[in-house]
Image (cartoon, coloured by chain):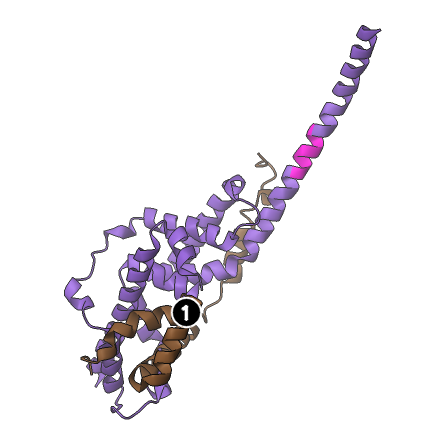
Amino acid sequence: MAKKSNARKAVAMSEQAPDTAGRGLAEKARSRVRFEEEALSHANQVYKVARHLAGSKEEAEELMQETYARAFRSWRSYAPGTNMRAWLLRILTNINIDRGRRKQRRPAERSLEEGDYSLYDRLDAAAGGDDSSDDEERLLNRLSQSGIVDALTTLPHDFRDVLVLVDLGEFSYQETAQILSVPIGTVMSRLHRARRLLKQSLASSLEAER
Amino acid sequence: MSESPCTKCERLLQSYLDGELNEIEAREAEVHLDDCGYCRRHYRFERAFREHVRKTLTEEPMSPELKLKLAALRSGAHPADRS
């Protein structure tokens, strides 16, 4: 009797197994499609960051394709419910680093000593303002799009990464630290220096125009 | 101007603008901004500057060609690759 019962169970299992396996495969395929759709829904925002991490539009497009190809291959390593945009940008910044951009030299420390406040004064003076003026718009109108793009492009990559992630990607210091795999203190100090360098560069270009 | 006694406030105001201060620190920054015209002027400029940079740098959208290329990378676009 026991033998008959075991045999019945075995038959039942052999009939159910392919079904269960089929359902598992179908669920996996659906999860993958959902993952890919969600990843693509972040593409515009990821591109916004990629465009300014890479030196040119062409480079940014290559970076995007490489990032999405890698993301779609490693879809299982994404933990559902976590920040997918940050996950994608972690892949993107790693690829960008792998592309050998770390070779760029660091700026001389001397050039970083100038404080933000004195840079504001330099910018203000270069834009033709005086100490009593508080018209930000007048100053900002002097900063052309190409001037800002050029100033950003000349930033060392380590600095540009944090500036773009925080100011354009709108990531917190903590998220940026996770994306770049660096301590939060490093994010803060690079960000501080990046903003100084950006303003220094803009002030110099305005002064050169005068 | 560069000798301002408020130079030490630069980092505090940067973090304040980035929304990275806790409630107590943010309150301290606000009290300081209320009291100090020099910092207030720089804070206003810094806020406007960031907004200007953000607007200037985000005008270029992703091309439709790139969108198509990314969509073509999906597993569904390559039925053989369904592992």
In the image, taking residue B65 as reference, residue A207 lies left or right, namely left
Q: Could you say which is closer to the camera, residue A56 or residue A204?
A: A204
Q: Could you say which is closer to the camera, residue A189 or residue B39?
A: B39
Say whether residue A174 is visible: yes
The relative height of residue A130 versus residue B64 in the rendered view (above or below) is below
| Image position, residue A194 (x, y; %) | 29, 65
| Picture quarter with the N terminus of chain A | top right
State the residue position of label 1.
B24
| Picture quarter with the C terminus of chain A | bottom left
Say whether residue B57 is visible: no
In the image, taking residue A3 as reference, residue A153 lies left or right, namely left
Instruction: Identify the residue shown where x is 45% and y is 64%.
Output: A170
In the image, taking residue B20 as reference, residue A43 lies left or right, namely right
The relative height of residue B1 versus residue A50 in the rendered view (above or below) is below
Rendering quarter of residue B57: bottom left
| Image position, residue A60 (x, y; %) | 40, 58
Name the chief secondary structure element in magenta. Answer: helix
Q: What chain does badge 1 belong to?
A: B
Q: Colour of chain A?
A: purple
**Mark 1: which amino acid?**
Ile
| Image position, residue B71 (x, y; %) | 56, 51
Read off the magenta span.
Answer: A21-27
The crowd level at tag 1 (other Cα within 10 Å; few <14, some 14-19, many 20+) is few
Q: Could you say which is closer to the camera, residue A166 or residue A91?
A: A166
Q: Colour of chain B?
A: brown
